[in-house]
Image (spheres, coloured by chain):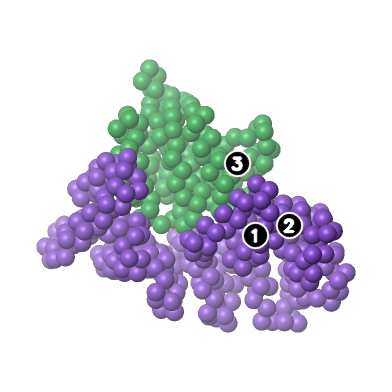
Amino acid sequence: MVSKTEETQLNRLENQVDNGGGGAWEYLCLVRKLKVRRSEKVLKHGLSILNDPKKRSALGPEEWTLYEQVAIAAMDCQCLDVAKDCIKVLMKKFPESKRVGRLNGMLLEAKGSWAEAEKAYSSLLEDSPLDQVIHKRRISMAKAQGNISEAIELLNKYLEIFMADHEAWRELAELHVSLQMYKQAAFCYEELILSQPTVPLYHLAYADVLYTLGGLENLQTAQKYYASTIDLTGGKNTRALFGICLCTSAIAQVSKGRNKEDKESPELQSLAATALEKDYKQRAADKLDLLTRALRSLKN
Amino acid sequence: MAADLKYEISQNAYIKLVLHALKHNTTAVNGILLGRVNPQNENVVEIIDSVHLFHSNLALLPPLEIALIMIEEHYGSQGLGIVGYFHANERFDDVELGIVAKNISDHICRYFPQAAVLLLDNKKLEAVPKGKCQSPVMQGLT
């Protein structure tokens, strides 16, 4: 998960490097730190450093990290020859390395030789059964072959060991959502909210899943979580504001026959609508009319 | 529904969808097709514009509902309606219309029975300049 400031900084650096302004190494380090997937840029700029012997020696021991980074980026862009060359260099320098063994496994994956990659990973796991990256590669392989249920099974086993891996919980939630297993996705988000209660993203995602599940109770809980998202983000989250409007109208529809739930909903709905209109006025004034009409059609 | 339906897609609509899919080449993407029935020939549906929707968590309801409401409002005032759905799968070799895509397109068909469902053909997209097209999967009759 990358914050907005980090993302702007990254984009700024990327623009600078793309337009010949230097700073390629800084860019590559930032990409590595934030763990974002910008393989084409990494490949281009990484290779420009690696192919220039002066720049390469200026890196010192970091040169090998760059080889690894470029190898992975090359595999992502299907430039398997580049990847193979980088891995060869690394194998010469670190002959018995497990880290290079992992890269070899990834190369087999990139070629589509799933069985061989699985063999490579299993043997690596025998030596180091707690290597998180290899576990995750196996899950990715299952996902890449379209076997989502196996990916979910493997991911569940992984989470039994590494319970604190938040990104893994998020991945599991998204896998469940893609299979429309919303109850299980809700469980994942609950775990995330329990361990990191101040991250608004999880509240928002949880509310979305609850709304999708439907039913009066879920809708009411979803409304509460949209409200907590707004609380945690200081009122700036547009999706949560919309979510409140949707929930109010959905709750009204569901409880048409029953007269109990009239208490705070209209106030909440009008507060959310006002906040949305203010936001649109500031950031997209030409769409304000569209927003008002959409909100009105929701109210009916 | 014995008549042969023809669909005409405008360059604008087509390009927007494909570019969006290319930008988010590591995830599934989807979009809505907008247009109208040709006033001269009711067996021809013109797809005049498109709106690309999401590139993550396509199966969640709230963003989809809001998007559909706003799309209908905006294009309704221009005389266009929702005439179809576009989907591009995450994996290169996945040529099936998944559950999510089927559900969404079924929903659209309920409102517009002649709705078109377009699935991006990744292999054709790979053959870069020419031959880049989608394999239309007609959904009218389910």
Q: Residue B121: which disc?
A: 3
Residue drawn 68% across and 54% down? A22
Per the image, the residue denoted by label 1 is A27
User: Are tags 1 and 2 found on a single chain?
Assistant: yes
Determine the secondary structure under disc 3: loop
Label 3, label 2: how many angstroms apart (C-alpha)? Answer: 32 Å
Mark 3 neighbour class, 10 Å CA radius: few under 14, some 14 to 19, many 20 or more: many
Determine the secondary structure under disc 1: helix
Mark 3: which amino acid?
A: Asp
Mark 1 neighbour class, 10 Å CA radius: few under 14, some 14 to 19, many 20 or more: many
Most extreme residue toward the left is A259
The quadrant of the image that shows the N terminus of chain B is: top left
Most extreme residue toward the front is A21
Task: Report the mark closest to the observer, 3 or 2.
Answer: 2
Between residue B23 and residue B37, name the one nearer to us: B23
Task: Report the mark closest to the observer, 1 or 2.
Answer: 1
Q: Earlier in the sequence, mark 1 or mark 2?
A: 1
Quick check: marks 1 and 2 in contact, CB under 8 Å? no
Image-based side of A236 in relation to A296, left or right:
right
Residue drawn 38% across and 40% down? B109
Q: Chain of mark 2?
A: A
Mark 2: which amino acid?
A: Gly
Task: Report the mark closest to the observer, 3 or 1.
Answer: 1
Res A139 → quadrant: bottom right
Per the image, the residue denoted by label 2 is A46
Specify the chain shown as purple.
Answer: A
The quadrant of the image that shows the C terminus of chain B is: top left
Label 1, label 2: how many angstroms apart (C-alpha)? Answer: 10 Å
